[in-house]
């Protein structure tokens, strides 16, 4: 029964991490320079989930849970934007490579992550209620 709680908690942790990645993408959608002032457009982060939760306590949760396998930077998530006279005009035609981050897509992803998080909370609450009922029956 505790495995069910581990599975829900693993899902909540994964969705919280996903929300952090989405927030970072939205916050950095116009960043073109690194901390030293060099031209280095922000690269969109993407999260990859994998089955199982290696950190879970129960065998079932290790097999059935979910965890974040990787957060990677997508080097192809750049688009050319016409900005003549910009200091980072790399091609000489007025185009600058900027992060290809669509705030609407990120917002939809955030809503999906929030709903998945809520579903895991509800599953954890149901598991707790079942355990409490089982303990009442034993008492």
Image (cartoon, rainbow, N blue to C red):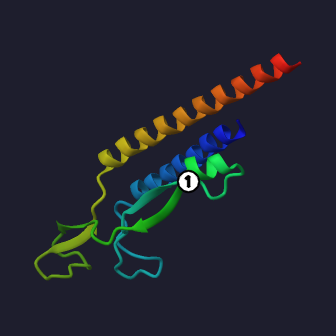
Using the image as rendered, state which of residue 28 and residue 67 is in the foreground.
67
Could you tell me which secondary element the residue under label 1 belongs to?
Answer: loop
* Percent of width and height locating residue 124: 64, 33
| Residue 117 image offset from top left, x and y in percent | 53, 39
Q: In which quarter of the image is residue 108?
A: top left
Which residue lies at the image location 31% right of the left edge and 47% below the top edge? 105
Compared with 108, 79 (above or below) is below
Seen from the viewer's position, the closer of residues 67 and 131 is: 131
Residue 88 falls in which quadrant of the image? Answer: bottom left
Instruction: Please identify the quadrant where the N terminus is shown.
Output: top right
**At x 58% / y 29%, what residue is drawn?**
122
- Category of crowding for the residue at label 1, using alpha-carbon neighbours closer than 10 angstroms: few (below 14), some (14–19), many (at least 20): many
Name the residue nearer the viewer: 138 or 78: 138
- Which residue corresponds to the image point at 41% horizontal and 80% vertical from the top-left? 37
Note whether residue 65 is visible: no
> Mark 1 sits on what residue?
52
Where does the image place residue 42, in percent across and percent down from the top left?
A: 37, 69
The residue sitting at 67% across, 50% down in the picture is 59
Residue 70 lies, with reference to residue 86, above or below; the image says above
Q: Is residue 25 left or right of residue 61?
A: left
Horizontal and vertical percent position of residue 36:
46, 82
In which quadrant of the rendered image does the C terminus lie? top right
């Amino acid at each position: 029964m505790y495995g069910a709680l581990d599975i829900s908690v693993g899902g909540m942790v994964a969705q919280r991490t996903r929300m952090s990645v989405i927030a970072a993408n939205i916050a950095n959608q116009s960043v073109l320079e690194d901390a030293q002032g060099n031209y280095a457009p922000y690269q969109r982060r993407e999260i990859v989930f994998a089955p199982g939760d290696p950190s879970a306590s129960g065998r079932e949760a290790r097999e059935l849970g979910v965890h974040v396998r990787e957060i990677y930077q997508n080097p192809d998530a750049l688009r050319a934007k016409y900005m003549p006279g910009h200091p980072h005009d790399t091609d000489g035609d007025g185009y600058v490579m900027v992060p290809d981050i669509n705030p609407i897509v990120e917002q939809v992803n955030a809503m999906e992550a929030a709903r998945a998080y809520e579903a895991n909370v509800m599953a954890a609450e149901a598991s707790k209620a079942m355990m409490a009922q089982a303990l009442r029956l034993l008492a």
